[in-house]
Amino acid sequence: MSETAYDIAPANGSHPPVMHDEQLLEFVPGAVYVCDTDGVVVRYNKRAGELWGRYPTPGDPKELYCGSHRLYRANGDLMPHNETPMVDALRQGNSYRNLEVQVERPDGNKIWILVNIDPLRNETGEIVGVINCFQDITDRKLADVRQKLLVNELNHRVKNTLATVQAIAAHTFRGGVSAEASKGFEGRLMALSRAHDVLTRESWEGANLKDVVDEVMAPVAGTGRLTIGGPDVTLEPKFALSMSIAIHELCTNAAKYGALSNTTGRVEVSWSVLAESTTRTLKFAWQEADGPAVRAPDHRGFGTSVIERTLTREHDAEVKLDFFPTGVRCEILAPLA
């Protein structure tokens, strides 16, 4: 790559100073380096050397594609210099945005960097080099790790609390309530626990509805009589917990009295998002078929109350629960955050 000078005219209109590539790169706020058509590192600024932990000689034919001591992919695998995206950018003309890579310095310390790569072209569009702009994101990555550890610790403590509540309830219920009521209570705790697992995997920022459905319905998932489908929908944590309880109650009732209580029944779970100008509404449907003949219960049980009252009061949802002879149908309309 030939030497290039840049003319920068000052505001007072005096004769512009001549600034070479090496000087110009020092004004870039991040680390940056340039390779020629052979992949040789021919330019880099001081910040790049600081992050690499070394200052290779520009133009040294042994310094190919990167001036770092050693590179690792985001998953921790070693990345030889001749396998970096710089090679693809130079040979194929592809650009890369926000790649996370680890750099190992000569002293053995590792840092995380965020990489952006672009091919350099001349006036005719021919590739004449490649440029890499990168920045240190080690503090951010360490913060992410600490946050994940804290969330996992929180989840561990919540699970321990649920286990303690379960033990206290078992001791309290002994001889005082029916075995069926005790089992129902434990089932609801387990549904909450599974929803907590989903939320923990997402750092409690939200939960994918399909993951919630899959986790809660896991005890009956092997029956081969479930149809589950819908678009990706993220629920805020409180709504995810409420939905997990509602789905658990529907599943429990189906196993006791409905479509999952015989060998032929089927359950279809589906959802969609109704988008209007300023709001998004979740439409969730539970439909049973081919089970025993259904009749409306004489009174609303606890499970039905949970489905109707919790979602209605806490989440502004509309819940319609119908006991058709051909199978139970539940439809939930709830605003999404």
Image: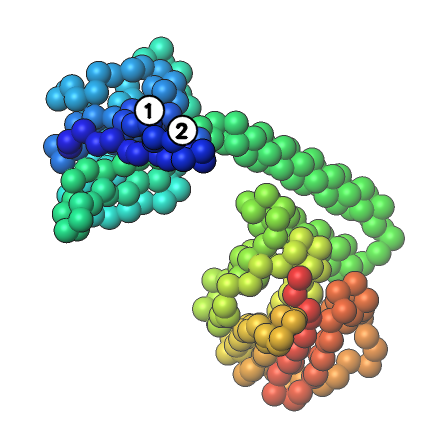
Side of 326 relative to 4 (left or right): right
Residue at the (62%, 37%) spot, across then down? 151
The N terminus is located in which quarter? top left
The kind of residue on which mark 2 rests is: Phe
Side of 98 relative to 314 (left or right): left
Side of 1 relative to 251 (left or right): left
Q: Position of residue 220 (x, y in %)?
A: 54, 63
Task: Using the rendered image of the protein, determine whether residue 44 is visible from the camera's viewpoint.
Answer: no
Numbered label attached to residue 27:
2
Q: Position of residue 256 (x, y in %)?
A: 66, 70
Which residue lies most toward the right here? 176
Residue 26 drawn above or below residue 190? above
Residue at the (81%, 75%) spot, across then down? 300
When asked about the image quadrant of residue 259, the answer is: bottom right
* Nearer to us in this view, 34 or 332: 34
Residue at the (69%, 59%) spot, across then down? 239
Q: Position of residue 186 (x, y in %)?
A: 71, 52
Which residue lies most toward the top here? 107
Task: Using the rendered image of the protein, determine whether residue 204 is visible from the camera's viewpoint.
Answer: yes
Residue at the (55%, 57%) spot, across then down? 208
At mark 1, the secondary structure is: helix
The kind of residue on which mark 1 rests is: Gln
At mark 2, the secondary structure is: loop
**Display coloring:** rainbow
Numbered label attached to residue 275:
none
**Could you classify mark 2 by the number of other residues whose Cα lies within 10 Å: few (under 14), some (14-19), or many (20 or more)?**
few
The C terminus is located in which quarter? bottom right
Q: Tell me, yes or no, whether the two marked residues, 2 and 1, touch with CB atoms within 8 Å.
A: yes
Numbered label attached to residue 23:
1
* Nearer to us in this view, 261 or 76: 76
Q: CA distance from mark 2 to mark 1?
A: 7 Å
